Image (spheres, helix red, strand yellow):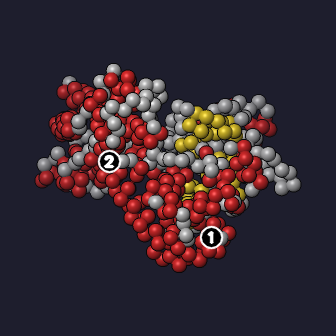
Amino acid sequence: MEALLRWAAELGVSDSPAPPDPSTTSSSCLGRSLVVADFPDAGGRGFSAVRDLRRGELVLRVPHAALLTSDRIMADDPNIAACVGAHRPRLSNVQRLIVCLLAEVGKGKSSSWYLYLSQLPSYYTILATFNDFEIEALQVDDAIWVAQKALSAIRSEWEEATTLMQELDFKPKLLMFKTWLWAFATVSSRTLHVAWDDAGCLCPIGDLFNYAAPDDDISSEEQDTEETMKCHDKKEMLEEVNFSCSSERLTDGGYEDSKAYCLYARKMYRKGEQVLLGYGTYTNLELFEYYGFLLDKNPNEKLYIELDLELCTIGTWPKDSLYIQPNGHPSFALSCALRLWTTPANRRKAFSHQIYSGSMLSVENELEVMKWLGNKCVETLQQLPTTVEFDGSLIQFLHNLQNSANWRVDVDQSRFQQEFAVFRRFHGMNLDCTHNQLTVRLLRSLERWELAVRWRCSYKRALTKCILYCKRVIHELSLQ
């Protein structure tokens, strides 16, 4: 990591709020605003603030020369440029970036990106990396379909690019599908958006930020007020107010006219806090698919249940707006659609204006909506093979097993012997195996299995909350 930080500094990467002085050299690109730190319970390796940071303050600048893009690789290597150019019409930008990435990996220490590439994770937990056992552990049909579809699409893209990689004389290991899958996961989970290439760019140092979901827990105005009230000097206060007023456009980051990728503090951070980066609103299934992690509390979570076709098409609401929120409440669109759907067909037009405004039609109609939705959630839960309580215990068991000194004893003493027997059969583990330590391959599978159970458990918890919500509303309406 120290060598990587020195290399990045030489390319002009800096966490200094002021533009770096070209005449000076530094042994690290960090230390003025950020420092690499470990956050075991919040994303692992990430950035910690070395001083108090203001909302909207520039915390990292990565110049164009440090960004890894397919254009940059091809500009440095005419052979890659010629081969990729010949295949350009039939390959996507993502495929081209993956090929360029693998070409640099194949160069080993002779690659100018070696220090960066050597710091990339050796494996990922995006959904496409899941085997059949781990995919089935998701239990919910929609999630299983997403995982299978993602894997099928990636395999198809690999097959399309194989001829190009052979022309580039890739080593056999680099031609393997599992290597392509690693490179795809790297691009999927680590690239940042740039306007000129929809594949994005790999941003050394910038991709060390852990994710924060956009939410409304504290508004920008509240933060600005809090900061301003702490300014004791009148001049400092005026500067702070001016800063806040001119910073409304600031987001977490982007490529700017300064020919650099600039990343900003998304809120006010205190010294020692983890500095996070928000790069979009994602459900947990989407975070799972693209980035390989989940959030215990995700304000952008959406829970979908199977709905009748007529219900999905009865109004003008998009199907993806018909969901249950993590607190168990139906979305605005789902509430409206259910009210319209439960209204007699010959009266829907007369009440459509009231329904589209989000108003309750009548106590009777709302009772029918709540009873239907609650029963649907109960039915959905009953169709799943395990309960929330079982999944919660299994999550803890799998977590502990990954740190176990004697997995055989832990399994034998647990209530999950049957589940682990299926796991062993899938991986071809000898039932008479005497090894107490699990292999790295099996530990990684346990990690993915735990993630799958965590996702389905979160799904079931939201269903349970929706059932309780419906019961509460029915009780309150019955008293009227």
Q: Residue 328, can we see it?
A: no
Residue 472 drawn at (x, y percent): 26, 27
Q: Residues within 10 Å of mark 1 (few under 14, many from 20)?
A: some
Q: Is residue 259 left or right of residue 380?
A: right
Residue 324 drawn at (x, y percent): 32, 41
Give above or below for 311 relative to 161. above
Instruction: Please state which of residues 205 and 353 is positioned toward the viewer in this rendering.
Output: 205
The residue drawn where x is 42% and y is 50% is 129
Residue 27 drawn at (x, y percent): 79, 45
Mark nearer the viewer, 1 or 2: 2
The residue indicated by pointer 1 is 74
Asked if the residue at tag 2 contacts the one at tag 1, i.e. Cβ–Cβ closer than 8 Å, the answer is no
Q: Residues within 10 Å of mark 2 (few under 14, many from 20)?
A: few
The residue indicated by pointer 2 is 132
Please, what is the three-letter code of the amino acid marked with disc 1?
Met
The residue drawn where x is 63% and y is 66% is 73
Q: Is residue 375 left or right of residue 400?
A: left
Please, what is the three-letter code of the amino acid marked with disc 2?
Asp
Sequence-wise, which precedes: disc 1 or disc 2?
1
Residue 432 drawn at (x, y percent): 33, 31
Q: Secondary structure at mark 2?
A: helix
Give above or below for 87 relative to 111. below
The residue drawn where x is 46% and y is 68% is 162
> Residue at the right extreme?
23
Could you say which disc has been placed on residue 84 in the image? none
Q: Residue 439, can we see it?
A: yes
